[in-house]
Amino acid sequence: QVQLVESGGGLVQAGGTLRLSCAASGSIYRIDTMEWYRQAPGKQRELVAGITSGGSTNYADFVKGRFTISRDNAKKSVCLQMNSLKPEDTAVYYCAADLLRVGAGYLVHYWGQGTQVTVST
C-alpha cells in the first residue's frame, strides 16, 4: 500500500511563513513528478507547484516568487516553503505524486489526505 502523508500546516498571520512536508511510503519503485495542490472552500482544486525527479520545477503564477518546492529523492519526500503568505492562500493543501509501485507496469497518481493552511489578516 502506498501512502502520502503531509505535515506542517497551521495558522499563520499574513506575511508569515509555513513549510509543508510530504513523505511517501510503501512499495514504491520510482516516483516521477511530485506536486502540491490546494483547494479553498467553494473553489476547485488547483495546482500550486510541481517538481520532476530531475529537479525541474513549475509554479502557478499566484505563488511565483513566494513559494519554493523541493524534494529529496532518497527520502521520497517533497516540501513546499511558503513565504509572504496572504489570506487568499488559505486552503487545504494536498501533496500528489505520480509513482510506479513495485511490480506494477504503469504510473499511478496518488494523493495525500491534505493539510489545512489558514492565513489570518
Image (cartoon, rainbow, N blue to C red):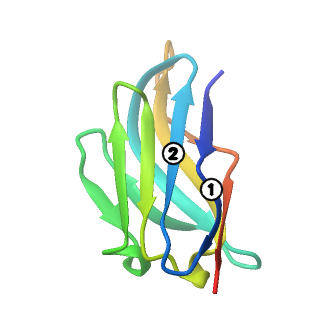
The residue at 62%/38% (across/down) is 5
The reply to whether the C-beta atoms of the residues labelled 2 and 1 are less than 8 Å apart is no
Q: Which label's residue is closer to the chain start, 2 or 1?
A: 1
- Residue 101, position as x, y percentages in the image: 51, 21
Residue 48 location in percent, x, y?
47, 66
The residue shown at (57%, 76%) is 89
Q: Give the residue type at disc 2.
A: Ser
Residue at image coords 60%, 44%: 6
* Kind of residue at badge 1: Gly
Residue 68 visible in the current orientation:
yes
Rendered view: 76 above or below 36? above
For disc 2, the neighbor class at 10 Å (few under 14, some 14 to 19, many from 20) is many
Q: Is residue 31 above or below residue 16?
A: above
- Seen from the viewer's position, the closer of residues 28 and 13 is 13
Within 10 Å of disc 1 (Cα), the crowding (few <14, some 14-19, many 20+) is some
Position of the C terminus, as image quadrant, is bottom right
Residue 72 lies left or right of residue 78; in this view the side is: left
Left or right of 105? Residue 38 is right
Q: Position of residue 56 (x, y in %)?
A: 24, 52
- In the image, residue 22 sits, relative to residue 1, either above or below, namely below
Task: Name the residue carrying label 1.
Answer: 9
Task: Name which residue lies at 53% across and 31% down.
Answer: 24
Q: Which residue is mark 2?
A: 21
Q: Quadrant of residue 9?
A: bottom right
Can you name the residue that lies furthest to the right here?
Answer: 42
Question: What secondary structure is marked by label 2?
Answer: strand
The answer for how far apart the CA atoms under marks 2 and 1 are is 9 Å
Q: For the residue labelled by badge 1, is the local secondary structure a helix, a strand or a loop?
A: loop
In which quadrant is the N terminus drawn? Answer: top right
- Return the mark for residue 44: none
